[in-house]
Image (spheres, grey):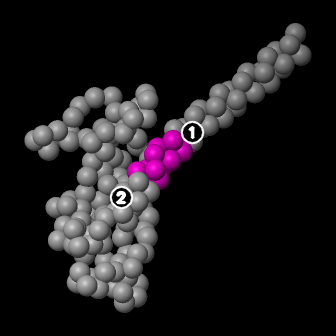
């Protein structure tokens, strides 16, 4: 009888340890999913900014400016990703308000620095921030940068 009781105790302890391991694994998988989404959104924005023509956009998107800590005009957007299908949409409606649905909402901010890190180049930095209300308590922000040559004729 004591042996059976001891065996049940060991089995229960093992099952509790397995349940804790599975809970931690699920949490890490969710966090990895959000980080992967943030990396994709940051890479997409950097690619978009690198494709812009200096002469056409020098007064707005590619002009030195922006902020990684505040919403500067022309230097931020909000993006929604469907939590079911992964489809990316613009998060704002015609009035600039964020639409409410089951999607995860992220904000992208970018800053363009002239002659950084050396003369004749621009450093473009993008940060992706998960917005509150997504139930992403443990998701961190993601930041990345790229350097591109300046168009000196456009007044870099």
Mark 1 is surrounded, within 10 Å at the Cα level, by few (under 14), some (14 to 19) or many (20 or more) other residues, namely few
Horizontal and vertical percent for residue 91? Answer: 25, 41
Out of 122 and 104, give the one closest to the viewer.
Answer: 122
Is residue 39 rendered magenta in the image?
yes
For the image, the number of numbered tags is 2
Q: Say whether residue 76 is left or right of residue 25.
A: left
Q: Which residues are magenta?
A: 31-41
Tell me which secondary structure the magenta stretch mostly adopts. Answer: helix
Spatial CA distance of label 1 from label 2 is: 29 Å
Q: Say whether residue 140 is left or right of residue 11.
A: left
Residue 141 visible in rendering: no
Q: Which residue is mark 2?
A: 48
Horizontal and vertical percent for residue 152? Answer: 29, 85
Q: Looking at the image, is 17 positioned above or below residue 120? A: above
Out of 98 and 146, give the one closest to the viewer.
Answer: 146
For residue 50, which quarter of the picture? bottom left
Mark 2 is surrounded, within 10 Å at the Cα level, by few (under 14), some (14 to 19) or many (20 or more) other residues, namely few
Horizontal and vertical percent for residue 37? Answer: 45, 46
Disc 2 element: helix
Name which residue lies at 31% across and 81% down: 151
**Quarter of the rendering occupied by the C terminus:** bottom left
For residue 150, which quarter of the picture? bottom left
Name which residue lies at 43% across and 28% down: 84
Residue 72, label in figure: none
Name which residue lies at 20% across and 42% down: 92
Is residue 34 rendered magenta in the image?
yes
Name which residue lies at 26% across and 52% down: 77
Q: Earlier in the sequence, mark 1 or mark 2?
A: 1
Q: Say whether residue 12 is left or right of residue 114.
A: right
Q: Looking at the image, is 42 positioned above or below residue 101? A: below
**Outermost residue, left side:** 95
Q: Which residue is mark 1?
A: 29
């Amino acid at each position: 009888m004591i042996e059976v009781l001891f065996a049940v105790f060991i089995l229960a302890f093992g099952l509790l340890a397995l349940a804790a391991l599975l809970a931690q694994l699920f949490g890490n998988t969710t966090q990895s999913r959000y980080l992967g989404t943030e990396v994709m959104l940051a890479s997409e924005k950097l690619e978009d900014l690198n494709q812009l023509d200096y002469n056409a956009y020098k007064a707005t998107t590619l002009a030195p400016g922006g902020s990684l800590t505040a919403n500067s005009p022309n230097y931020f957007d909000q993006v929604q990703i469907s939590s079911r299908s992964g489809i990316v949409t613009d998060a704002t409606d015609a009035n600039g308000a964020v639409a409410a649905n089951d999607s995860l909402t992220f904000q992208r901010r970018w800053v363009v620095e002239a002659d950084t890190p050396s003369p004749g180049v621009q450093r473009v930095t993008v940060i992706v921030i998960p917005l509150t209300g997504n139930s992403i308590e443990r998701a961190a922000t993601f930041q990345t940068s790229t350097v591109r040559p300046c168009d000196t004729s456009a007044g870099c």
